[in-house]
Image (cartoon, rainbow, N blue to C red):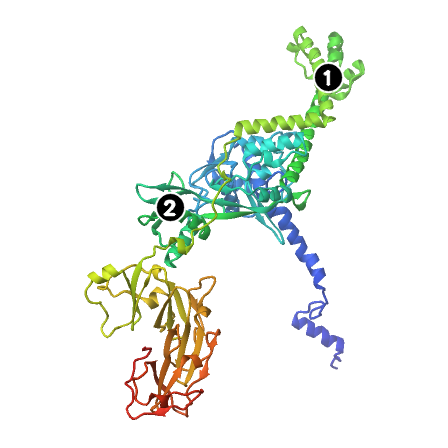
Amino acid sequence: MAKKTTDSDKSAKKNALSGYIENAGLVIEQPIADTLKTNYMPYAMSVIVSRAIPEIDGFKPSHRKILYTMYKMGLLNGNRIKSANIVGQTMRLNPHGDMSIYETMVRLSRGYDALLCPFVDSKGNFGKSYSRDMAFAASRYTEAKLEKICAQIFSDIDKDTVDFVDNYDSTMKEPSLLPVTFPTILANINTGIAVGMASNIASFNLKELCNTTIARIKNPDAVILDTLKAPDFASGGYLLYDEDELNKIYSTGKGTVRIRSKYIYDRANNCIDITEIPPTSTIEVIVDKIVDQVKSGKIREIVDVRDETDLSGLKLTIDLKRGVDADKLMQKLYKNTGLEATFSCNFNVLIGGTPQVMGVGTILDEWTEFRRGCVKRGIAFDLEKKKEKLHLLKGLKKILLDIDKAIKIIRETEEEQDVLPNLMIGFGIDEKQAEFVSEIKLRQLNREYILKRTDEIESLRDEIAEMEDTLNSKSKIDKIIIEQLKAVAKNFGQERKTEIVYDFDDSVESEEEKIQNYPVKLFFTKDGYFKKITPLSYRMSGEHKLKDGDEIITEVDSQNDVHILFFTNMGQVYKTRAFEFEDTKASVLGEYLPSKLGMDTDEAPIYMLVTSDYAGDMLFVFENGKIARVTLSSYQTVNNRKKLIKAYSVKSPLVYIDCIRKEKEILLTSSANRNLIVNTAMVSVKTTKDTQGIQAMTMKSGIRILSAKTYTGGSIDGEHRLRTKNLPAVGTVIKEQAEQLSFGGK
């Protein structure tokens, strides 16, 4: 008999076949706030605390792990070793990959030139901070050790001056902070981007920094600006002094400083040599920007720019045209390229695991308090050692008072394990003292040894008393810190690399001041070529050189400073100045405007307008019989844009274009052989450039305007019949049609 299949059996069979997962398909509501709190916030805090933001000792964890590894490897006093070895050893503390460790070490090195106070003594190619393309060599080729100043950042680290924590796999210990003897937090540039916050700390001259810290310890109200002049950068350059901005940085930790490149004008070769650039720039970015400025015509004084950086240091050479004022050109380059840059300060520091944006004064106070703790812990460590030694010597003194008794106890003790207990009972000393006494050699049981040990007890008591007094005296602790700061300033301090400029010129010579103005003749051809020729050169020239089929449609006597507007067949206008074109001769083709002005594909200039004051109106006649009149001032822009779109209406093909500065008459001729003379005074002026204007001639379906030209009175018999008092008008058919005029004729 077949077994009956139940619903539960079917369900079990289905789950077995489908790979049953408990709660599969169950939708659980999960509030976004809880998700962020549970998943995102731990990550954000990890980045802030463990990666991006420096602590009061001036280091991020990655920096600290590398330096401590090198210290434990004996690289403070030893010879340089391969960087790959250092990287490998550092991975015991930092498991983030060899390349990230090596890149961090590179940035700490002297060879990289990024830090005012480098910590790694490097040999080999470590790249350069001022170059984007100058890459560092692989770690197997370079060598490194610690700089001598690192003795100051590991001072007394083995005396319990800082806390030690487990590394990532709890196989060894590493310091949570380094007991630095000077404010490294402000001695070097330190930049980090965390989650929702960032840090950007400027560097300060080590001498000035130590002196300021000393002044701050002696007098918390000391004016920082008196001793800490301004930030100092490893890249050098000129710092433009702004007292208000510096006071803001010193008090709030936020603000900006402006740094300019240093340059030398080589008169013999007529070139500028850039030798120092701002810390936020690279030489490749500067070169690219200068080239862009030259190509766009904004800078015309430069012949060539090249990077001549070599083993002797940074050098960017700019060749100048003859007669160029180097100082005025540099003012222009400062404004338009990375040769001048700002360093935005954001002094965000981790204090007790909490990020805080603080001014220089507050940072120095926090560092001083941190350093006081390190000094106290170091003294307490030494004090404990001396107390232990004193305790042992006190036991020795008791033994030495009756050395024969001690020898007798040892000789009469049958088993070695009973020696210490018998000594403890015989002299009333503890186990440590008895252990110390039992280790004394026979040759030391002489009068000299006994007297020295006894005298040492007294000196130890004095030292212990002095240490205890120091621990309880803030002024004595501060005195120790001050002496250490003075030693650092004396042994490692250097002169400023970034020169402070108190009086500087921010003005840039305007275009009008730079232009050499002189008479010129301007020529515009039908095929879009342009020539600028001086009158003298034109008189000495022969015939114009033109392409086959090309012809000059506009010739203007003008000046080198005038504005030129080129209207195109796509309803756009390109603005330029006469001085942006080189003087040429009639015997050359001239400059091809679509290429020179960067016109769009298939775009061509159809009309040239020369103006110095934007006075007058533009008149447009369209095939549909409409006439638009736009004030020329509508094409004048404040920011000197080179290209204006919607320069005129493109809803109907353009028949005629001209600039009018006084009223005149226009003769319109339609495809129906009708003619109409329109006075421009009847056309109202608009400011909207792409206006369609007014209907001048009434047009039937399929009829269009064939031509428009400036009309001179008396050219047509019975011309009064062609005029009208009102627009639009149908026009009149005349027996003898006026000759056809070319497009744009006057």
Distance from Cα at disc 2 to Cα at disc 1: 73 Å
Q: Nearer the viewer, residue 607 or 560?
A: 560
Tell me the kind of residue under disc 2. Answer: Ala
Numbered circle sitting on residue 362: none
Q: Quadrant of residue 606?
A: bottom left
Q: Can I make out residue 737 in this image?
A: yes
**Dot 2 or dot 1, earlier in sequence:** 2
Q: Which residue is mark 1?
A: 461
Q: Is residue 567 left or right of residue 260?
A: left
Compared with residue 498, is residue 156 higher up or lower down, i.e. above or below? Answer: above
Horizontal and vertical percent for residue 191?
A: 56, 46
| Tag 2 secondary structure | helix
Residue 153 is at least partly visible in this image: no
Say what amino acid the circle numbered 1 marks.
Answer: Arg
Q: Quadrant of residue 717?
A: bottom left
Rendered view: 313 above or below 392: below
Position of residue 57 relative to residue 26, above or below, is: above
Q: Quadrant of the C terminus?
A: bottom left
Q: Secondary structure at mark 1?
A: helix
- Count of labels in the image: 2
- Local crowd size for mark 2, using a 10 Å CA cut-off: few (<14), some (14–19), many (≥20): many
Outermost residue, top side: 447
Foreground mark, 2 or 1? 2
Judge by depth and name the residue closer to the eye, 597 or 562.
562
* Residue designated by label 2: 326
Which residue is at 38% across, 54% downward? 299
Query: Measured from the top left, where is residue 383 in percent x and y?
Result: 71, 24
Horizontal and vertical percent position of residue 311: 38, 39
Around disc 1, counting alpha carbons within 10 Å, would you say few (fewer than 14), some (14 to 19), or many (20 or more)? some
The vertical placement of 623 against 126, above or below, is below
Image position, residue 333 (x, y; %): 42, 50
